[in-house]
Amino acid sequence: MSDNNLTFRAVPGPGFVAGCTVSTWLHRGALAEPIAHVLIGHAPPRRPHEDALSVELGLLGMVDAMRLRPAAERVPYVGARLIMRGPYVALDYGHPKFVMRLPAPGQEWRAHVNTGGQVCLTIVLDSIPPGAGPDAIDAHLERVVAIGRAYMGATDLRHR
């Protein structure tokens, strides 16, 4: 029996990924082990063929390809998706030919990941304001999680 309601969203290519906004940070809680974070969103539509729907579908294609789950649910492990070569870090976001380079994760972030630390990967569907600082990002995350527009997964370093 087939399900005619299945939807398959395409994994976007490098043109779409170039418009993504990416933030990385290392959260050190008082009692818990540090947690590395990657937050991915997209700038407001700016190219001639982009609109809010096409941007959302591109992000959802990444969500589907990486098997992320709604942030309000238990965070699943989505496999080893990080590739690190010296100071460069890339994310296998599910495209068969391309990866997403993460912009300059700090030394502590890279050391945490390099020693086996997991990373909380979050994709948000609502655009992140360019140049948003930590307080604005926290408020944005709180809002999109509450309204079901954030997806998460845990990942770590891929070893050859």
Image (spheres, helix red, strand yellow):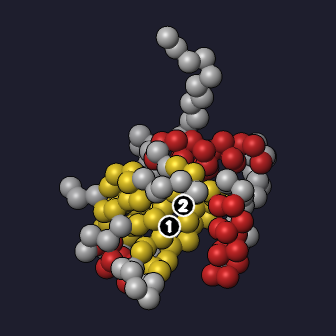
Residue 104, above or below 66? below
Label 2 close to label 1 by CB (< 8 Å) = yes
Kind of residue sitting beneath label 1: Val
Q: Position of residue 45 (x, y in %)?
A: 76, 53
Question: Foreground residue, 79 or 106?
Answer: 79
Residue at point 43% right, 73% down?
Answer: 36
Given residues 160 and 2, the one toward you in this image is 2
Q: Residue at x 45, y 79 (%)?
A: 26
Give x and y (percent) for residue 138: 65, 75
Is residue 120 depicted above or below 31 in this figure?
above
Dividing the picture into quadrants, the one containing residue 127 is bottom right
Is residue 23 depicted above or below 67 in this figure?
below
Q: Residue at x 50, y 49 (%)?
A: 68
Label 2: few (<14), some (14–19) or many (≥20) C-alpha neighbours in 10 Å: many
Residue at which label 2 appears: 122
Judge left or right: residue 86 versus residue 53.
left
| Residue 154 drawn at (x, y percent) | 41, 59
Residue 146 found in image quarter: bottom right
Res. 52 visible in picture: yes
**SS label for mark 2:** strand
Percent x, y of residue 82: 36, 60
Q: Residue furthest left?
A: 160
Q: Residue furthest top?
A: 1
Q: Which residue is mark 1?
A: 38
Q: Which mark is residue 2?
A: none
Q: Is residue 42 left or right of residue 76?
A: right
- Local packing at callout 1 (Cα closer than 10 Å; few below 14, some 14-19, many 20+) is many
Tell me which residue sits at (69%, 48%) in the image. Answer: 55
Of the two numbered discs 2 and 1 on the same chain, state the one appearing first in sequence.
Answer: 1
Q: Secondary structure at mark 1?
A: strand
